[in-house]
Amino acid sequence: MSKTIMDQATNKINIVGKLLDTTFREGKTSTGQNYESCNFTVRVTQTYGGREETSEIPVSIFATQYTSQNKPHPGYKNIQEMKKMKTVQDYGEAEATVVRMTNANIRENNFVSRSGQLINGWQINTSFLNEGKVSDIASFNMDIFIMDMHEEVDREGEPTGRLVIKGAVVQYGGRLDVIEFIVEGNDAVNYISRNWEENKTVNVGGRIRVTSQEEKRSASESSWGEELPETSTRMVRELIITRGSDEPFDDDFAYDAAEIKKAFNERKARLEQMQIDAKNSTKKSAPAASKSNYSWE
């Protein structure tokens, strides 16, 4: 018998690094209970694949003052204690607190842009933030149902040599998230291409990359004159698979494709409703058109 859609997938995040910045917020839930939340960034320098890389990873934490049993929530107290930690922003790199996550996980994060485009991404949440003393790391360990595997191409349509894997992650209550992963390096790409396949369940592990990349291009489109280069910065948020199952899980430990399909359709309906709600909200808040004062109109 295979796993059911109510069996939550392995979803573990391990981050240790310098506390870069914090933004705290407090308020009341719809039931009137006090809550505290914090969006913070952790600077992580790690070496893998023979290359050192620094990432600045955003994380969120949230807790109500009391649990559902009306007991003091330990997470609420933890956020209070976070306010005493030193950030790179306020104290510099040398004095900043080294922090580590407890019970951290990754979730899909979707929103509708002002232009009405649906933006798909992911976010990291944690239950506790404590001081850490071990080496920097930003890694993940997850079970995913492979929905798609394809070769990555650049903006010109040229292959990059990397593999893109779209994985379904079963969250609490049978909710389905769809998250994109990247495979780098010929050995890893070749192994996965030979031994993994779509509609199968596998375990993946690897590194979290949140960096910025500088891109240069020519801004000149005319046939004469000086060519003026332009430089722009592109934010890169990637989950890089560096290890995983030798082969897909046996049927007894894998998710059923039919149940994944049903959960995927429910997700699709949620996203469509999100776009409808965003469109209706834009119509209600749009200002009245003003009359032009230009004489030629």
Image (tube, rainbow, N blue to C red):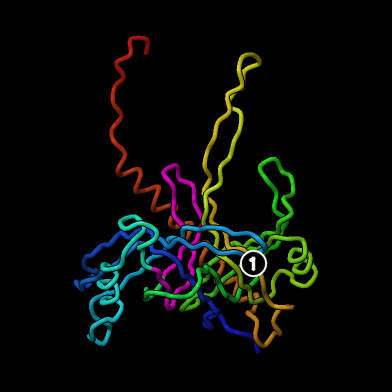
- Per the rendered image, the range of residues in magenta is 98-125
Q: Quadrant of the C terminus?
A: top left
At x 21%, y 65%, the residue is: 27
Horizontal side of residue 92 vs 263, given as left or right: left
> Between residues 43 and 251, which one lies in front from this camera angle?
43
At x 77%, y 65%, the residue is: 187
> Between residues 275 and 61, which one lies in front from this camera angle?
61
Pointer 1 local density, CA inside 10 Å: few below 14, some 14–19, many at least 20: many
Horizontal side of residue 208 vs 103, given as left or right: right
**Hey, what amino acid is under mark 1?**
Ile
Find residue 270 and report its horizontal and vertical position in percent: 46, 62
- Quarter holding residue 77: bottom left
Q: Quadrant of the N terminus?
A: bottom right
Q: Which residue is mark 1?
A: 241
At x 58%, y 63%, the residue is: 239
- Is 103 inside the magenta-drawn segment? yes
Horizontal side of residue 128 vs 104, given as left or right: left
